[in-house]
């Protein structure tokens, strides 16, 4: 990526920026010079149901500012319409514009029950996933988009897990499968609704993400992540959160980004399109690896897809 602040003067809202992909996207927008409102439920005073107190929105805002942008942390429960309405009113009052909206709210990984039939799932947890991964996105867009459509060129990014094509394969847990497919349809629908206002809407997914939670799961760090390949061979294709962050940055700065509107995109796809790499200089194509090698039986290794 260039060192230029190509998004200077732009205002972004990254909803769900406490950790993982959301944090990385906020930081990369900041690196490009944007002013970024970062939201979530975990602050230095309060921990959300995710239960990871060491990752806070204040930290994310500080990382945004350290990268060259301006980070503003606003504690927000995106399931509470009143809080989201107040958030967007504040952005309007303080900035008078919104150029980029990233719906990255999730926090439901702990609720997933893979390889479990619907009738055996914990119903409360399944329905909670819908609330966390679908309702939050709808509520946030409802209040934020009237501010965005004042100017042409706005970008809405629906963050999910798996491309539209990849998710045609069942994700082994019905409520999770439904939750992660809905953002594709939200982006598709918003692309149609935003067209007359010169806006763009896409869905965007990382590949095999080396999030803080995933690193903890394997007992490794970002520096030692390859040690986990012995436990999980497919982790060899894993990517750092920076890759999707760089993808968002490139997309937001593209004056011709409207060509993507309504489409399902991945971090690896954008890396090829815009010519950037992950932090280690590689360009991992997780979905190509899984489709060809893991599911397709093609000879090859993760190294062939980096």
Image (spheres, grey):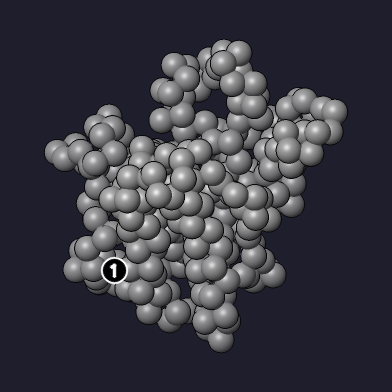
Secondary element at tag 1: helix
Residue 107 image-quadrant placement: top left
Which residue lies at the image location 61% right of the left edge and 18% below the top edge? 229
Q: Residue at the right extreme?
A: 299
- Report the front residue among 48 and 14: 48
Which residue lies at the image location 65% right of the left edge and 50% below the top edge? 169
From the viewer's perspective, tell me whether residue 304 is left or right of residue 200.
right
Number of marks: 1
Which residue lies at the image location 39% right of the left edge and 44% below the top edge? 120
- Report the front residue among 250 and 127: 127
In the rendered image of this protein, does residue 239 appear above or below residue 266? Answer: above
From the viewer's perspective, tell me whether residue 180 is left or right of residue 285.
left
Q: Residue at the bottom extreme?
A: 196
* Percent coordinates x, y for residue 190 in the rendering: 51, 75
Residue 195 image-quadrant placement: bottom right
Q: Which residue bears the numbered disc 1? A: 88
Mark 1 crowd level (few <14, some 14–19, many ≥20, 10 Å Cα) = many
* Percent coordinates x, y for residue 204 in the rendering: 57, 55
Q: Is residue 17 visible?
A: no
* Percent coordinates x, y for residue 98 in the rendering: 40, 69
Quadrant of the frame with the C terminus: top right
In the rendered image of this protein, does residue 212 appear above or below residue 82? Answer: above
Which residue lies at the image location 64% right of the left edge and 26% below the top edge? 234
- Report the front residue among 22 and 285: 285
* Percent coordinates x, y for residue 248 in the rendering: 56, 52
């Amino acid at each position: 990526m260039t060192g230029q602040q190509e998004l200077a003067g732009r205002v972004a809202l990254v909803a769900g920026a406490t950790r993982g992909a959301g944090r990385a996207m906020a930081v990369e927008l900041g690196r490009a010079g944007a002013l970024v409102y970062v939201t979530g439920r975990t602050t230095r005073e309060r921990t959300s149901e995710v239960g990871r107190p060491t990752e806070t929105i204040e930290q994310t805002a500080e990382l945004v500012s350290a990268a060259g942008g301006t980070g503003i942390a606003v504690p927000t429960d995106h399931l509470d319409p009143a809080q989201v309405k107040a958030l967007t009113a504040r952005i309007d009052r303080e900035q008078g514009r919104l150029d980029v909206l990233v719906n990255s709210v999730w926090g439901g990984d702990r609720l997933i029950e893979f390889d479990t039939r619907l009738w055996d799932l914990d119903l409360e947890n399944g329905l909670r996933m819908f609330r966390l991964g679908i309702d939050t996105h709808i509520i946030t867009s409802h209040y934020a988009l009237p501010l965005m459509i004042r100017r042409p060129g706005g970008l809405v990014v629906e963050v999910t897990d798996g491309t539209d094509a990849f998710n045609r394969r069942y994700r082994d847990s019905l409520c999770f499968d439904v939750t992660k497919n809905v953002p594709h349809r939200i982006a598709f629908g918003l692309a149609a609704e935003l067209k007359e206002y010169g806006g763009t809407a896409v869905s965007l997914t990382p590949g095999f993400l080396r999030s803080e939670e995933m690193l903890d799961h394997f007992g490794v760090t970002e520096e030692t992540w390859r040690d986990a390949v012995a436990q999980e061979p497919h982790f060899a294709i894993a990517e750092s959160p920076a890759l999707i962050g760089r993808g968002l940055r490139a997309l937001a700065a593209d004056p011709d980004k409207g060509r993507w509107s309504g489409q399902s995109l991945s971090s690896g796809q954008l890396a090829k399109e815009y010519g950037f790499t992950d932090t280690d200089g590689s360009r991992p194509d997780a979905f190509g690896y899984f489709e060809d090698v893991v599911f397709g039986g093609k000879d090859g290794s993760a190294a062939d897809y980096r």
